[in-house]
Amino acid sequence: MATITKRELALKITDQLGVKGIELTQQDVLEVLQTLIDEITESLAQGDTVVMRNFGAFQVREMKAKIGRNPKNPSKDVKIPARAAVKFKPGKEMKEKVATTLKIIRQRK
């Protein structure tokens, strides 16, 4: 499976916009992507939920404190404190599109 970096994503977006006649530089698109990431992060840090229709929703959830095991010494308990964690719930359109990729994933193995 391929990993797509922010720069590669910006390049793809720049190319797609160019085909549509919208001329933006790769740097412009990178700035828009970074601004989007910053705004989502800031909203989540404030405890807000960020919803993008047909894509999904980001929300902050509390992960309760628990007792874990030290993999190097399984007989020792390790206290894991409560923390805030970001959860992503995909939207309907994304779920449907991703559901068709199982064959592709299996072929790559």
Image (cartoon, rainbow, N blue to C red):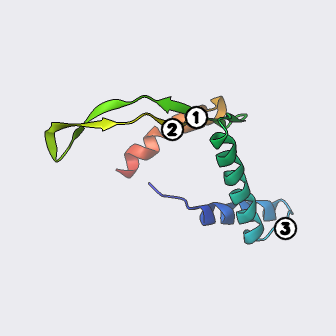
Q: Is residue 42 left or right of residue 17?
A: left
The residue singled out by tag 3 in the image is 23
Crowd tier of the residue under label 3, counting other residues whose Cα lies within 10 Å: few below 14, some 14–19, many 20 or above: few
Q: Is residue 70 left or right of residue 24?
A: left
Residue drawn at the location 42% of the way across and 28% of the way down: 64
Q: Quadrant of residue 15?
A: bottom right
What residue type is disc 2 on? Ala
Q: Of the residues tagged 3 and 2, which is closer to the observer?
A: 2
Separation of disc 3 and disc 1 at Cα? Answer: 36 Å
In the drawing, what numbered circle is on residue 87? none
Residue drawn at the location 73% of the way across and 70% of the way down: 26
> Up-down: is 15 above or below 76?
below
Q: Of the residues tagged 3 and 1, which is closer to the observer?
A: 1
Which residue is at the front of the view, 85 or 22?
85
Q: Is residue 27 left or right of residue 92?
A: right
The residue singled out by tag 2 in the image is 85
Residue drawn at the location 16% of the way across and 38% of the way down: 76
Q: Quadrant of residue 59?
A: top right
What residue type is disc 1 on? Val
Q: Quadrant of residue 7?
A: bottom right
Q: Secondary structure at mark 2?
A: strand
The residue singled out by tag 1 in the image is 60
Crowd tier of the residue under label 2, counting other residues whose Cα lies within 10 Å: few below 14, some 14–19, many 20 or above: few
Q: Could you tell me if the residues under marks 3 and 2 are in contact, i.e. CB atoms within 8 Å? A: no
